[in-house]
Amino acid sequence: MSTIVSLPDQQTATLPKRSYLNSEYGLKSWLLTGDHKRIAILYLISITFFFFIGGAMAGLIRLELLTPQTDLMAADTYNKLFTMHGIIMIFLFLVPSVPATIGNFLIPIMVGAKDLAFPKINLLSWYLYIIGGTLTLAALISGGVDTGWTFTTPLSTHYLNTHVITAGLAIFVAGFSSIFTGLNFIVTIHRMRAPGMTWFRLPLFVWSHYAASILMVLGTPVLAIALVLVLLERTIGIGVFDPAKGGDPLLFQHLFWFYSHPAVYIMILPGMGVISEVISTFSRKRVFGYTAVAFSSVAIAVFGFFVWEHHMFVMGVSNYSALVFSLLTMLVAVPSAIKIFNWSATLYKGSITFETPMLYAFGFIGLFTIGGLTGVFLGSLGMDIHLTETYFIVAHFHFVMVGGMLMAFLSGVHFWWPKMTGRMYPEGLSKLAALVTFIGFILTFFPQFIVGYLGMPRRYAAYPPEFQVLNVLSTAGASVLGVGYLLPMLYLTWSLKYGKIAGANPWQATGLEWQIQSPPLTENFLETPIVDYEAYDYEWLANKTKNEVTTVG
């Protein structure tokens, strides 16, 4: 590959000049920026803010469930609390977490471009996210929503003591943020790859974002349409979902879950891309079955559009329809299993090291595997009838999305933090945080599988006394988990000023992002790179390093 930039001296005590972090204009230059890296940082700050708001709500939920009675709050307040927790964590954290932050920062660099295809639209997508978040907070301050985050009809269309309109508009606006981001990624990956960067030289991180972007662009408008119809029925009384006016309440379920199950893969696919990069780097091997892993991302995106009805097995769908969707639900597990098996094969006989990103990656594999296997239980008709609307569902969802996605997000943040900031973080403390997070998560959510199987329904502030012991364990685990989430915010903030200078490639990883300075130049590359090596080619990296040492000598 041709020389891209002159790398800074790794012993230099100041950040490199011409970095995207340096500015003569202060806050205004950030708020009006077209630089994808700055927009990624803006997303990172705002998403972290909403994560801790949603996390605080989760803590209050667990405190209420510490005892079988409704001691801490009224039942109606509890309904609003878990609804707003779900809305904030899903639409303002989980959906945009990796794509809008790490993906925004890295995809142009990984493909050899100087920015995304549409920089102004990229900035607009962040402003739309902020507008959506502000409207969500307005709904919360005004009194909240108590329909559940799924906005189930007729609760969302007829019940008056809830701010569905404000929250619905919030999700509608934030949805366009996702659409614009997905569109930007698709065009950039298709049209702006560097010379020599063929499809099968792309990092798997890019493949996963490409598949997720297809889901964003095709699936999000369906949710937008469903919410608009809810708002119209609520305001002017059209009869789309009201049976008394010729509507069908099941139609809303079809529209909502047609987006919301693919949304699971919008959340998890980018996280899988992170894990591919981390596993390869810290085992010093090319990902086993690169082509299979790449196409499995596309297969997940395709199958994701054909499994929505498994959320509706007890809602009156036909037996034949339920049988078909049960089979499709089993099939969607296959491409996910391909990734797990191929990551495991990559580790086999690898030169494995246990840096912090790798620990989070191992946590992802363990928690996501448990979550995926319990999803097969829910795809089975007989088991689903017993487990629907119990805490088994809560545990399954959190193992996949919180255990899986958040572990991947933290793995990616720790992996690319030196590239984003030019600074390292304290390794011992970060490893402790990874361990505390994993233990806290297991203690929090594994007991919920048990109480769910035993029949404890979700969305109730009160429960039978025989479930208290496991709920106390779950609440105690949430306290540990909270510490695990708080630690990275503290030491990563500390590292911005006091962290060791990282250098261009502290992990000795392949990929274009590791061949430029840390933090990157505003324009990413001084010269257009020419890619003449395969993805994850560590032999190429070793030869390149050897040649550089020989030249210096």
Image: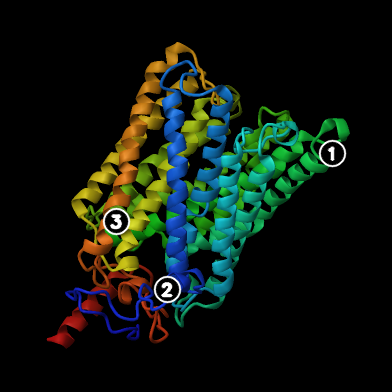
Disc 2 residue type (three-letter):
Ile
Instruction: State how far apart marks 1 and 3 are (Cα).
Output: 52 Å
Give the residue at mark 1. 239
State the residue in front, 121 or 383.
Answer: 121
- Left or right of 67? Residue 332 is right
- Of the numbered discs 3 and 2, the one sitting upstream in the chain is 2
Position of residue 405 measured from the top left corner of the image (x, y, whole percent): 44, 47
Q: Residue at x 38, y 76 (%)?
A: 23
Quadrant of image for the N terminus: bottom left
Instruction: State how far apart marks 3 and 2 are (Cα).
Output: 23 Å
Q: Residue at x 41, y 72 (%)?
A: 26
- Residue 268 vs 182, above or below: the answer is above
- Residue 536 vs 70, above or below: the answer is below
Disc 3 residue type (three-letter):
Leu
- Residue 239 vs 268, above or below: the answer is above
Q: Secondary structure at mark 3?
A: helix
- Of the numbered discs 2 and 1, the one sitting upstream in the chain is 2
Name the residue at the left extreme.
553
Give the residue at mark 3. 492
Q: How many marks?
A: 3
Position of residue 182 measured from the top left corner of the image (x, y, whole percent): 57, 63
Give the residue at mark 2. 109
